[in-house]
């Protein structure tokens, strides 16, 4: 697939000398090349989007959402093809790839309610003959910088809301998985948005810096690793932009002795090893409480060992490869480090090769027990199919352990006790909380984001938070003395 920028409703081949390889992680084959654009291409897209803004802003909101209805239908009609491309370039199974697009489509559907969602407020007669009005107005040109692990979905936490509220928009996909957005933009072209309302520029660091520094870009959303999220947040904020930056994670799951162990094991295994552990909401630290330890340890090891690993496009495969060989090497190095720090590899996924896919970046599910708090393996986001296990005697100790981590993206509890669930929900420091849930991913009409080092910003993605993020409030106070109306 040829990867091109989309600016002014035209496909443009950028004149760059550097490209990033898009690699099929199951085979190791180079399947596309992402042009690494910079200032010049970001300038062109921003100029186009800025010119389109006044006309798009004046387009009535109920007309703006008609484009989203059309986009929704195209996404649904092409669901299988998008899923296939996601699996091909990102590695997750076809089922997981299709599931991420379900959430993307739901976000388009929620944003179709924008006529209701962006309505203002009015208070009449705050003093005799004086009314106060709050209006929500779009910001101008907004941009999204996306990570590799959800090539389709993450942009849709933002794009439908940015457009429906009347902003014009630039997407910068991950250079490692640019094919999915290339295809989605072919659908966007079929929607027939007015010229330059929605644009795409490919690239990496240079494109990101150009977005962060561009004076005409008003708001930026970023999703990726914590170090880059902090950097993006700082630099964009210094430049006076509205910014939200979602970062990395290390998500704890606490397993109480009264949990249903069959259900718990299945759900925890799906969370830890689904998408090869490359979800920002994947559980990666399992903390057993009291007697939960023995049965859970045994059952999760069985689940890890029995998971069918292979090319995500092959039927019956339950877990695909990680994104590339560098990531595989890094994950294997961290597993090794864990064992030198005193953890035991109860199931060890290092050194995996899959027959017929010898060039693939496969790591089998791995279970490490007796991981020590504050060890490197405890602190570091592994972003692979590795579950670190710890043991404590009480729920208080478990919550304290969970809360001592720098990240706060998600925390889960498995229990049949309402009192334990309530205590956990109340006390745990995380933006997304699961009770007997392994991937607590909020529906499109709830806000998405973590806490602590998993998020830098204020307003979140999806739903009303996205409406708030992509609009600015204007308060108008009007005096219309009663005697004036008597003149008519
Ligand atoms: P990444 O930080 O490497 O890349 C994210 C984006 O930043 C990409 O578009 C990339 O081109 C750009 N980028 C990379 N290096 C840069 C640099 N030096 N300067 C400026 N921009 C740069 O992240 P990734 O590896 O693509 O994605 C995985 C990470 O994203 C994990 O840490 C995961 O936890 C996190 N993530 C978080 C969430 C969330 O909601 N909190 C969701 C998905 C992924």
Image: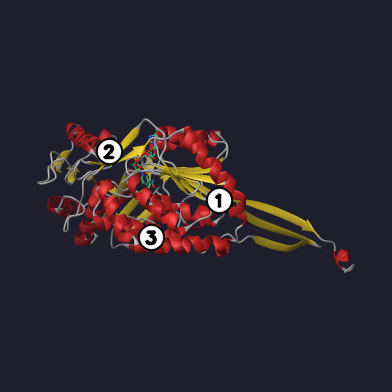
Numbered disc total: 3
Q: Is residue 191 left or right of residue 384?
A: right
Q: CA distance from mark 2 to mark 1?
A: 42 Å
**Quadrant into which the C terminus falls:** bottom right
Q: Which residue is denoted by mark 1 in the rendering? A: 167
Instruction: Give coordinates of residue 208: x percent, y percent.
Output: 44, 36
Q: CA distance from mark 1 to mark 3?
A: 21 Å
Q: Which mark is residue 351?
A: none
Q: Which residue is denoted by mark 3 in the rendering? A: 75
Is disc 1 surrounded by few (<14), some (14 to 19) or many (20+) residues within 10 Å? Answer: many
Q: State which mark lies toward you, 2 or 1.
A: 1
Label 1 vs 3, first from the N-terminus: 3
Residue situated furthest left in the rendering: 355
Label 2 vs 1, first from the N-terminus: 1
Report whether the residue tagged 3 is closer than 8 Å to ligand 1.
no
Instruction: Give coordinates of residue 433: x percent, y percent.
Output: 37, 54
Closer-to-camera residue (102/249): 102
User: Can residue 108 be seen at all in this image of the molecule?
Assistant: yes
Q: Secondary structure at mark 2?
A: helix
Q: Is residue 293 left or right of residue 459?
A: left
Tell me, yes or no, whether the two marked residues, 2 and 3, touch with CB atoms within 8 Å: no
Residue under the image location 52 percent in, 51 percent down: 197
Is disc 3 surrounded by few (<14), some (14 to 19) or many (20+) residues within 10 Å? Answer: many
Give residue 318's quadrant in the image.
bottom left
Instruction: Give coordinates of residue 323: x percent, y percent.
Output: 26, 42
Q: Is residue 402 left or right of residue 334?
A: right
Q: CA distance from mark 2 to mark 3?
A: 39 Å
Q: Which residue is denoted by mark 2 in the rendering? A: 378
């Amino acid at each position: 697939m040829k990867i091109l920028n989309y600016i002014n409703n035209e496909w443009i081949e950028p004149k760059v000398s550097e490209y990033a390889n898009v690699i099929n992680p199951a085979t190791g084959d180079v399947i596309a090349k992402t042009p690494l654009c910079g200032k010049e291409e970001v300038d062109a897209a921003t100029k186009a989007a800025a010119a389109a803004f006044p006309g798009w802003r004046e387009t009535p909101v109920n007309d703006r959402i008609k484009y989203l209805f059309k986009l929704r239908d195209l996404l649904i009609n092409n669901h299988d093809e998008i899923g296939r491309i996601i699996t091909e370039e990102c590695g997750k199974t076809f089922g997981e790839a299709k599931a991420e697009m379900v959430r993307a489509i739901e976000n388009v559907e929620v944003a179709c309610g924008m006529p209701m969602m962006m309505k203002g407020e009015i208070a009449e007669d705050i003093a005799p003959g004086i009314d106060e009005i709050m209006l929500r107005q779009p910001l101008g040109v907004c941009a999204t910088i996306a990570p590799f692990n959800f090539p389709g979905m993450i942009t849709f936490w933002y794009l439908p809301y940015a457009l429906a509220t009347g902003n014009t928009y630039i997407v910068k996909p991950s250079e490692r998985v640019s094919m999915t957005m290339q295809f989605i933009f072919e659908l966007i072209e079929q929607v027939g948005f007015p010229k330059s309302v929605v644009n795409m520029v490919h690239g990496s660091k240079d494109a990101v810096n150009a977005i962060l520094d561009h004076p005409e870009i008003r708001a930026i959303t970023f999703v990726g690793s914590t170090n880059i999220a902090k950097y993006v947040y700082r630099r964009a904020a210094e430049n006076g932009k509205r910014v939200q930056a979602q970062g990395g994670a290390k998500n704890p799951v606490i397993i109480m002795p009264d949990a249903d162990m069959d259900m718990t094991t299945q759900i925890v295994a799906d969370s830890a090893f689904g998408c090869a552990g490359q979800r920002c909401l994947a559980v990666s630290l399992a903390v057993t409480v009291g007697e939960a330890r023995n049965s859970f340890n045994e059952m999760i090891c069985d689940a890890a060992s029995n998971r069918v690993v292979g090319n995500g496009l092959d039927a019956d495969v339950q877990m695909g490869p990680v994104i590339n060989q560098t990531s595989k090497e890094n994950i294997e190095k961290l597993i090794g480090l864990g064992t030198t720090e005193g953890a035991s590899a109860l199931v060890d996924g290092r050194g995996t090769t899959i027959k017929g896919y010898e060039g693939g970046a496969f790591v089998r599910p791995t279970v490490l027990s007796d991981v020590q708090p504050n060890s490197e393996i405890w602190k570091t986001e592994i972003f692979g199919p590795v579950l670190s296990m710890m043991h404590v005697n009480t729920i208080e100790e478990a919550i304290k352990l969970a809360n001592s981590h720098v990240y706060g993206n998600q925390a889960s509890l498995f229990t049949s006790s309402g009192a334990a669930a309530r205590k956990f929900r109340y006390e745990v420091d995380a933006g997304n909380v699961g009770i007997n849930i392994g991937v607590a991913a909020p529906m499109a009409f709830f806000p998405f984001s973590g806490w602590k080092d998993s998020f830098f910003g204020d307003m979140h993605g999806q739903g009303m938070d996205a409406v708030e993020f992509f609009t600015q409030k204007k308060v108008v106070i009007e005096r219309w003395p009663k005697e004036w109306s008597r003149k008519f």
